[in-house]
Image (cartoon, rainbow, N blue to C red):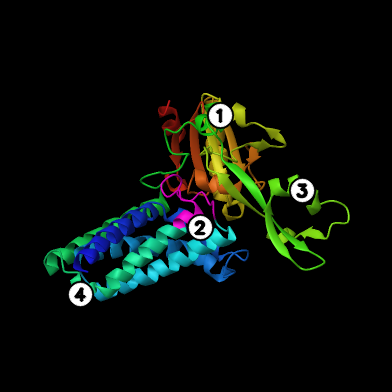
Amino acid sequence: MKYLVQFARIIVGVLFIISGFVKNVDPVGLSYKLEEYFSPTVLNIPFLEGLSLPLATFFSLFEIVLGVLLLLGVWRKFTTIALLLTIVFFTFLTFYSAYFNKVTDCGCFGDALKLEPWTSFYKDVVLLVLIIILVVGQKYIQPLFSAKVNYGINTLVLIVSAIIAYLGISHNPIIDFRAYAVGKNLIEGMKTPEELGLKPTTYKTIYTMKNKVDGQVVEIDDAQYIADDKWYKQGTPWQIEEDKTRTIVEKKGYEPPIHDFSFDCNGVDKTSEILNASKTLIFVVPFVEKVDKSQIAKLNSLGKEAKQKGFVVTTISNNPIKGLELENCFMDQTTMKTIIRSNPGVMILEKGTVKAKFHYNDFPTINQLEELF
């Protein structure tokens, strides 16, 4: 039992630190995910939506601290019980996501934590088993260093993690795991499997069929439905229960990391034009309702200066922006939230390659933009 506890201690501690760190560098990304969970269409606890960012920050710090406490071997009872409660909570969320196909793609963490819903759930189940072992065998968890050293390390980790979280909220994350990170070429990221000579992901639709005569219920896929006309011929007793129809992955293949990235400019698709321009300034406004007049004035001012310097300038948003004197295009809101964690934010492109991204708190000058080229 002693060695099993030590094995579980290392695995759980390291995984909690890694998982917490990914969230810690980008608390806003986790807050988007929590908002979706709290929304009326999912868990229906909308009063928590306004607390999503504080909760995201807390969870990210808490995960790291628990992982460090476990590895250091201090506060054994508190640490193991807290780990158990935390993993039970996340196991519930991942099961809910997988079973009900909810909150499966929020664009929250890019490639850093890209797990399929069921894979994420199974991962949490394994962690749950390991943490139960730790709870049962907590007497075998001994401090790694002296009390002063252990507390010193934990305090330092907490302070550094808090600073990283602050930077991720008030500025850009110190590490960008998303497909729109500085240096990434968006044109390459949008290429289809066919263009790259790779096999795409294939899907199949599952229908729930109910017999009106005897009440029998069966599940079939779309291929079975098409192959046998008993399901759809005139006079058939079988009916599709529309609310139970779902789509599942049949075979995993290549999926472009960038999707739903298109510029709808008054009904004209300007995606290719914007991506192929030598100097592009894009203002990203995921939440128009949260932008004030002073911010719009700054966008107008910088946008006009950039145009004079030869930049292609455009603004993407979820709705029309009142008072904006620049081109206003529209884009999927989840995509905009993935591009940058700022409202508004600034993205600079050179022939489709991301040269820089600026949080509103670090709003650039025209000289800063020119220095990029």
* Residue in the picture at 28% in, 69% down: 134
Give the residue number, with chain letter if any, for mark 1.
275
Along the line of sight, the residue nearer the viewer: 241 or 90: 241
Q: CA distance from mark 3 to mark 4?
A: 62 Å
Q: Earlier in the sequence, mark 2 or mark 1?
A: 2
What residue range appears in magenta?
104-120
Q: Quadrant of residue 183?
A: top left
- Amino acid type, callout 3: Asp
> Do we see residue 338 in this rendering?
yes
Asked if marks 3 and 4 touch (Cβ < 8 Å), the reply is: no
Is-magenta flag for residue 35?
no
Question: Residue 117: where, in percent of width, then height?
Answer: 50, 55
> Do we see residue 318 in this rendering?
no
* Residue in the picture at 52% in, 31% down: 198
In the image: residue 316, left or right of residue 33: right
Report the disc number at residue 33: 2
Asked if marks 4 and 2 touch (Cβ < 8 Å), the reply is: no
Question: Residue 25: where, in percent of width, then height?
Answer: 37, 51
Q: Earlier in the sequence, mark 4 or mark 2?
A: 2
Q: Indicate which label's residue lies in the foreground, 3 or 4.
A: 3
